[in-house]
Amino acid sequence: IGRLGITALDDPRRFHRDGRDEVELAIATFERLGDPLGLAKAWHLLAHLEWTRGRLTQAQAATMRAMALAREARDPYWEANAIGLHCLVLYWGPLPLTKVEKRSREALGDAERIGVPSLAATALRIRARVAAQRERLDEARRHLEAASAITEGQSESLIQGTHCISHALIELVANPALTGFQAPKVLWLADEEPDAYARVASVLLPKDYVRFMLTGERAT
């Protein structure tokens, strides 16, 4: 799932070509294992695939399934992901703007209920688009400013990226990226201290630094 998530962002053509078969295989596997969280992630990916291909009815159904499974797994982060994608699918679909706006207001309540601020930011951005389409530009600007205030300093996108990388690493090296690992810290440095990150030539763990000093070789 982590690898597919990275492919969807990094190589959408490949994801559109091969993703459905792999996602459907994942769904069948997670159903056999009785894993609702794995199923929520797989259905979310399927919804993303359908949405980016313009199959909005199928995408809406997949987001609803992902929401239900995330609630069953009691995972607020993936429930918020599914709700946010659901709102985006509704916005790009044939639904009247009044209903899109209503669902976005409900998503704001969902964000407060489950405690995931990024969902509120997504809902506010959709409300801004709706307001702009109605030529209520001051309202649209207020919504965008509120969304920016929420996401400023937020690290949820970093958490999601690390989550995907972690699952891909499990496939590659049979080892997840845990909190104390160096890679998440480097991602944090790049995000929070870009000037310092720009000066980084290489990153070595203590044991690797000792090796570098003894041999002049950067390796792990």
Image (cartoon, rainbow, N blue to C red):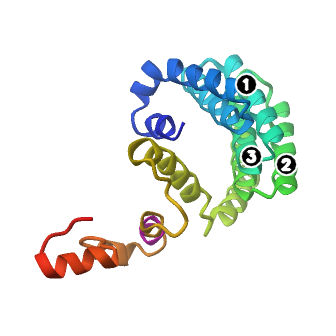
Identify the image quadrant of residue 30: top right
Give the distance between the C-alpha atoms of the residues marked 1 and 2, in whole angstroms. Answer: 18 Å
From the viewer's side, name the closer residue of 37 and 174: 174
Name the residue that disc number 1 marks.
60
Q: In the rendered view of the protein, which quadrant contains the C terminus?
A: bottom left
Question: From where the camera sits, is residue 156 visible?
Answer: yes
Determine crowd level at label 3: few under 14, some 14-19, many 20+ residues with C-alpha closer than 10 A: many
Name the residue that disc number 3 marks.
80
The residue depicted at 48 percent of the width and 68 percent of the height is: 188
The residue depicted at 24 percent of the width and 72 percent of the height is: 201
Q: Is residue 60 left or right of residue 5?
A: right
Image spot of residue 17 (x, y percent): 43, 19
From the viewer's side, name the closer residue of 26 and 49: 26
- Say what secondary structure mark 2 lies in: helix
Name the residue that disc number 2 marks.
110
Image spot of residue 216 (x, y percent): 12, 75
